[in-house]
Image (cartoon, grey):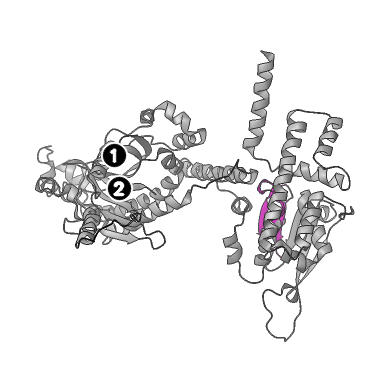
C-alpha cells in the first residue's frame, strides 16, 4: 500500500509531535544499462541514499534535537531504526521517528498538527469538498458517515490533493502525572489515493482499534499501580496550584515517554510489526483487476456481499458502548462466510475429497449424478449427511459450479436441520433426523454417506472414495430427470467427453452459465419489469431456445436463476423503466 503510518503525540511543552512512523519502500525498477564503463563507488553511493531515511536527515539539526523532550522522542538519534523485508515482493518497511524524505516529513508534520489540533469534530468533513465526495460513490460516503469522530477521540478523514489524504484516529493514554491524568495521541495513515483510503476505512478502523486498545490497557495497568502508591488527585488538591511551576510540581515529569507510560520494553519494535503488517495487509486486500467487458453477475454479487459484510461488521463495532451488541447466530455467520469456496480452501481440506464435477460423477455414477445435478439446478434443497465434514464440503464446492453465485446459500455442516429458505446446500452430521415434511417433499434430495466396513485390509488411498464410503441418494420427487433442462444435457456431454481436460470442462461450464444468465436477464426484463402476458412470454422463451423437450425444466431453471441476479442489475432496470415512463409522460 502506498501509504505511511505514523504515531503522533500532543506534548504539553512543544505541541503536536511525530513519535514514530512506518513507510513502505518499493524496490527500484530495473533500468536499461547505460553505455560506457561503470564508475566505481556508484553502487555504494546509491546504497547510502537508500538508507538515508534511517539517519533522520530530515530532522537532524541541533536546534530541532534540542527542541525535543522525553515525551517527544521515541528512538534516539543513534538508533538505526527498524527494517522488515517482504520476501515475496521485495518491499522494505522502514520505521523511525521521522520519514526519510523531506517532502514526506512536511506532509506527516501537517497531518500530525491537524489530527491533534483542529480536526476534532464531524463538521470538519466539509473540508473534503462536497462535490468530490459525491463523485467517489454513495457507498464510500456511507463509510465516512458511519463512524466519524464525534469529538476529540475517534476516527476522522481529512486532506486535499496537494498534501495528501489522512485517516486519523485520536485517543487518550492514562498518565498519573499529566494534566487531566491523560495524554493525547493519534495514529494517522497518510496516502495520496483518496478513493483507496476511504475504501479501506472499515479495515483500518478495525485493526487500528486493536492496537490502540492494547496501548490503553497496558498504560491503564501502569496508571492504576502508580495511583495505588501515590494518589495524585489528593496531592494536587492539597497543594497550592501555580501554572508557572506546575511542571516542577510533578517532579519535572511534564513530558513522559510512551515507553514509561506503558512499561513495554519492546514497544517500538511491536509498533513497527503492527504498522508493517497493516501496510502490507491493507495493500493486498484490495487489488486491481483488468476486466475485459462488463463484469459478470457473479462478480457483482460477490462485491455486494462483501460490502454488506463490511457494513454489518462496522455496524457491530459502532454499537459498542451503546448497550447490548447484537451478534449473528451461528448458522447465519457460517452461511455468510461460506457462500463461496475458493481453490485454496478446497486444497486445504484433509482426508478424501471430491476434486471436480467429473470426479463426483465417476464416484456416484452417471444416473445418480444426473439426479443430484437436476435438483441443484432446479433450486431444491440438497442435503448431505455423514461423519466426514471435509468430504461433504468438497462435494458442495464442486456442485456450486453448476449455479450462479447469487443462487448459492450454503451451510457446510450443521448439528441440526435448517429450513430450505435458509440454505439450498446443507451438510448434516450422521445422527441428525430429517423432518417428515422434508423427507416427503419433492423439492429436496438427501445423500447419505455411509462408511464401508473394510475389516483388516491394506491402507486405502484417499483418492479411492468408493473403497471408503457408500452413497445412498433418496428423494420423493417422481418427475423424470432424463429430459431436461437443456443446460444439464450440455453439461453432461462435456463431462462425459474424456478428451476434454478438467480445466477445459470448467471453462465450458462457465460459458454455459453465462449463456443462460443472459437468457435469465432477458426473461426478467420481459416478464418482471415490462409485465408482459403469458403469450408474449412464451414467444420470448421460444426465441431463447427454452422450449421443446424439457421445456418445463428450462422455465423452472430460469425462474430460479432470477433470484441470483445482482441488486445492482435489478435496480438499474427499474430505474431505466421509470425514467422512460417519465419521459413519455412529459
Q: Is residue 82 above or below residue 290?
A: below
Q: Is residue 435 above or below residue 235?
A: below
Residue 121: image quadrant is top left
> Element type at marker 1?
helix
Q: Which residue is disc 2 drawn over?
A: 6
Q: Residues within 10 Å of mark 1 (few under 14, many from 20)?
A: many
- In the rendered structure, does residue 200 fall within the stretch colored magenta? no
Residue 119: image quadrant is top left
> Element type at marker 2?
strand
Looking at this view, is 425 or 323 the one in front? 425
- In the rendered structure, does residue 414 fall within the stretch colored magenta? yes
How far across and how far down the image is residue 220, in percent? 31, 52
Q: Is residue 265 left or right of residue 144?
A: left
Q: Residue at x 87, y 48 (%)?
A: 550
Which mark is on residue 119? Answer: none
Screen quadrant of the C terminus: top right
Range of residues picked out in magenta = 400-429
Of all residues, the one furthest to the front in this rendering is 36
Q: Which residue is disc 1 drawn over?
A: 111
Looking at this view, is 463 or 296 the one in front? 296
Of all residues, the one furthest to the top in this rendering is 586
How far across and how far down the image is residue 117, in percent? 26, 35
How far across and how far down the image is residue 536, in percent? 84, 30
Q: CA distance from mark 2 to mark 1?
A: 9 Å
How far across and how far down the image is residue 27, in percent? 34, 56
Q: Earlier in the sequence, mark 2 or mark 1?
A: 2
Q: Residue at x 9, y 41 (%)?
A: 245
Q: Is residue 320 visible?
A: no
Is disc 2 in contact with disc 1, using a CB cutoff of under 8 Å?
A: yes
Q: Residues within 10 Å of mark 2 (few under 14, many from 20)?
A: many
Amino acid at each position: 500500500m502506498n501509504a505511511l503510518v505514523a504515531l503522533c503525540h500532543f506534548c504539553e511543552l512543544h505541541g503536536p509531535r511525530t513519535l514514530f512512523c512506518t513507510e513502505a519502500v518499493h524496490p527500484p525498477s530495473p533500468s536499461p544499462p547505460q553505455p560506457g564503463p561503470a564508475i566505481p563507488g556508484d553502487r555504494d553511493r546509491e546504497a547510502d541514499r537508500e538508507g538515508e531515511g534511517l539517519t533522520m536527515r530530515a530532522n537532524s539539526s541541533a536546534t530541532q534535537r534540542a527542541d525535543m523532550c522525553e515525551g517527544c522522542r521515541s528512538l534516539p538519534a543513534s538508533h538505526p531504526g527498524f527494517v522488515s523485508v517482504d520476501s515475496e515482493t521485495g518491499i522494505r518497511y522502514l520505521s523511525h521517528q521521522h520519514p526519510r524524505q523531506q517532502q514526506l516529513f512536511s506532509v506527516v508534520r501537517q497531518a500530525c498538527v491537524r489530527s491533534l489540533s483542529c480536526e476534532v469534530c464531524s463538521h470538519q468533513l466539509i473540508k473534503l469538498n462536497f462535490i468530490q465526495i459525491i463523485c467517489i460513490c454513495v457507498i464510500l460516503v456511507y463509510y465516512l458517515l458511519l463512524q466519524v469522530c464525534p469529538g476529540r477521540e475517534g476516527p476522522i478523514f481529512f486532506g486535499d490533493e496537494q498534501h495528501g489524504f489522512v485517516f486519523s484516529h485520536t485517543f487518550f493514554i492514562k498518565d498519573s502525572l499529566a494534566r487531566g491524568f491523560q495524554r493525547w495521541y493519534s495514529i494517522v495513515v497518510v496516502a495520496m489515493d483518496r478513493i483507496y483510503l476511504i475504501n479501506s476505512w472499515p479495515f483500518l478502523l478495525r485493526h487500528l482499534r486493536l492496537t490502540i486498545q492494547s496501548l490503553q490497557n497496558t498504560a491503564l495497568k501502569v496508571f492504576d499501580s502508580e495511583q495505588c502508591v501515590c494518589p495524585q488527585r489528593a496531592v494536587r488538591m492539597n497543594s497550592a496550584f501555580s501554572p508557572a511551576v506546575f511542571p516542577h510540581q510533578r517532579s519535572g515529569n511534564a513530558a513522559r515517554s510512551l515507553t514509561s507510560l506503558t512499561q513495554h520494553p519492546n514497544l517500538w519494535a511491536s509498533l513497527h510489526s503492527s504498522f508493517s503488517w497493516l501496510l502490507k495487509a491493507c495493500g493486498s486486500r484490495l487489488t486491481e483487476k483488468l476486466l475485459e467487458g462488463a463484469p459478470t453477475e457473479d462478480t457483482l454479487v460477490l462485491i455486494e456481499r462483501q460490502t454488506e459484510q463490511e457494513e454489518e461488521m462496522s455496524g457491530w463495532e459502532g454499537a459498542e458502548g451503546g448497550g447490548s451488541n447484537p451478534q449473528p447466530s451461528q448458522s447465519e455467520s457460517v452461511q455468510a462466510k461460506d457462500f463461496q469456496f475458493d481453490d485454496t480452501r478446497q486444497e486445504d481440506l484433509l482426508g478424501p475429497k471430491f476434486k471436480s464435477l467429473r470426479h463426483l460423477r465417476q464416484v456416484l455414477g452417471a444416473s445418480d449424478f444426473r439426479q443430484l445435478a437436476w435438483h441443484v439446478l432446479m433450486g431444491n434443497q440438497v442435503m448431505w449427511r455423514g461423519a466426514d465434514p471435509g468430504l461433504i464440503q468438497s462435494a458442495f464446492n464442486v456442485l456450486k459450479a453448476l449455479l450462479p453465485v447469487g443462487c448459492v446459500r450454503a451451510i457446510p455442516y450443521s448439528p441440526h436441520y435448517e429450513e430450505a429458505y435458509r440454505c439450498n446446500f446443507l451438510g448434516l452430521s450422521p445422527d441428525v433426523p430429517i423432518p417428515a415434511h422434508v423427507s416427503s417433499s419433492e423439492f429436496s434430495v438427501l445423500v447419505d454417506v455411509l462408511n464401508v466396513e473394510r475389516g483388516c485390509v491394506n491402507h486405502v488411498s484417499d483418492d479411492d472414495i468408493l473403497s471408503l464410503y457408500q452413497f445412498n441418494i433418496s428423494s420423493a420427487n417422481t418427475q423424470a430427470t432424463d429430459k431436461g433442462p437443456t443446460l444439464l444435457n450440455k453439461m453432461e456431454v462435456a463431462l462425459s467427453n474424456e478428451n476434454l481436460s478438467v480445466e477445459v470442462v470448467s471453462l465450458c461450464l462457465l460459458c454455459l452459465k453465462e449463456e443462460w444468465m443472459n437468457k435469465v436477464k432477458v426473461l426478467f426484463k420481459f416478464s418482471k419489469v415490462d409485465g408482459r402476458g403469458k403469450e408474449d412470454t412464451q414467444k420470448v422463451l421460444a426465441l431463447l431456445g427454452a422450449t421443446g423437450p424439457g421445456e418445463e425444466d428450462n422455465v423452472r431453471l430460469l425462474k430460479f436463476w432470477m433470484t441470483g441476479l445482482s441488486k445492482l442489475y435489478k435496480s438499474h432496470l427499474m430505474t431505466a423503466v421509470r425514467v422512460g415512463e417519465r419521459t413519455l409522460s412529459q
